[in-house]
């Protein structure tokens, strides 16, 4: 089921890219993470994605929930974390990521997505993900519903290595 969702996610991400992009190709599955790449007009784009093992909150309906790490070498952009909540975030709400003993709360939201505020924070989160066993994301929907999504980090480092090799990250 997860593989089917992530394949659909790959197709959806492609639809949001330039018309000259190629079809995403799977690099591989690494436990709970799947790695992909495609080419757009600027060059290769590599990303990895996962869905939470557990999603909690008092909601009746929620869309797709996933985390993505993206490398875009042509833009010199690496380690970009994106969290898709499956709902519209509450305006100016706080999203918190906990990995082991580390807490990251310097994220901003737009619609149903959250990103860290800087490249430095992205890199710190990715480093913690490499060392951790799980990531917990806390958010609040536009209706005030608090959510807690728990991701496994099994296979994260292998998937990260695969996208880094494919996109020539040094």
Image (cartoon, rainbow, N blue to C red):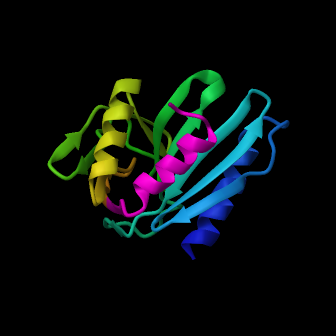
Instruction: List x then y, in percent, for residue 74.
Output: 66, 24
107 or 98, which is in the foreground?
98
Where does residue 134 sit, x and y in percent of width and height? Answer: 29, 60
In the figure, is residue 151 to the left or right of 67? left
- Magenta span of residues: 149-170
User: Which of these two is toward me, 34 or 116?
Assistant: 34
Q: Is residue 73 visible?
A: yes
Identity of the residue furthest to the right in this view: 20
The residue at the point 52 percent across, 55 percent down is: 49
Q: Locate residue 98, reporting x and y percent.
A: 24, 49
Left or right of residue 41: residue 72: left
Q: Position of residue 19 (x, y in %)?
A: 84, 37
Q: Quarter of the image containing the N terminus? A: bottom right
**Within the image, what quadrant is residue 72 found in?**
top right
Q: Quadrant of residue 106?
A: top left
For the point 14% across and 49% down, the residue is 101
From the viewer's perspective, tell me whether residue 92 is left or right of residue 8.
left
Vertical comparison of 73 with 31: above or below: above
Name of the residue lying farthest toward the bottom = 1
Could you tell me which residue is drawn at 42 percent across and 55 percent down?
156
Q: Is residue 109 covered in magenta? A: no
Q: Compared with residue 125, is residue 60 higher up or lower down, i.e. above or below? A: below
């Amino acid at each position: 089921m997860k593989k089917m969702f992530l394949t659909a996610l790959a197709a959806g991400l492609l639809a949001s890219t330039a018309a000259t992009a190629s079809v995403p190709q799977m690099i591989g599955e690494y436990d709970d993470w799947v790695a992909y790449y495609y080419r757009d007009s600027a060059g290769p784009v590599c990303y990895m994605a996962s869905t939470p093992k557990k999603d909690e909150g008092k909601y009746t309906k929620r869309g797709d929930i996933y985390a993505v790490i993206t490398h875009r070498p042509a833009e010199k952009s690496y380690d970009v974390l994106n969290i898709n909540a499956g709902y519209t975030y509450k305006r100016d709400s706080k999203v918190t990521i906990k990995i082991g003993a580390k807490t990251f709360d310097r994220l901003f939201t737009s619609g149903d997505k959250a990103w860290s505020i800087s490249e430095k924070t992205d890199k710190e989160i990715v480093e913690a993900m490499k060392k951790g066993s799980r990531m917990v994301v806390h958010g609040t929907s536009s209706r005030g519903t608090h959510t807690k999504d728990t991701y496994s980090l099994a296979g994260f480092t292998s998937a990260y290595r695969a996208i880094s090799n494919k996109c020539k990250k040094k």
